[in-house]
Amino acid sequence: MTNDQDIQQDKNNPIIREIIELERSYFFEKRNVKTERQRKLREIIERHTKPGEVSDDT
């Protein structure tokens, strides 16, 4: 029975690797998208505010 389990496990290894690779790329891709979104937001704010400008934000 151990032999059958080993065969099944070996058969599933490529599938498991592919799933892990996909999940990792998705995680890092989404993380990079968030970073890019934050960078663009910061650029917009900086572009529309003047250095040293104090405004009433109430």
Image: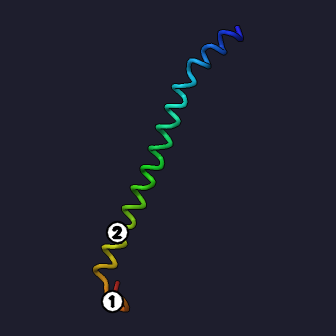
Q: Is residue 14 above or below residue 42?
A: above
Quick one: 10 or 46, which is closer to the camera? Answer: 10
Measured in 3D between alpha carbons, the distance from the residue under mark 1 to the one under mark 2, in whole angstroms, is 19 Å
SS of the residue under disc 2: helix
The quadrant of the picture occupied by the N terminus is top right
**Identity of the amino acid at label 2?**
Leu
Residue at the image point whose x is 43% and y is 49% from the top: 29
The answer to the question of whether label 1 and label 2 lie on touching residues, with beta carbons closer than 8 A, is no
- Locate residue 31, reporting x and y percent: 45, 54
Number of marks drawn: 2
| Residue at the spot of label 1 | 55
| Residue at the spot of label 2 | 41
| Quadrant of the rendered image containing residue 51 | bottom left
- Locate residue 57, reporting x and y percent: 34, 84
Q: Is residue 50 above or below residue 23?
A: below
**Identity of the amino acid at label 1?**
Ser
- Locate residue 26, reporting x and y percent: 44, 44
Which one is earlier in the sequence, the residue at label 1 or at label 2? 2
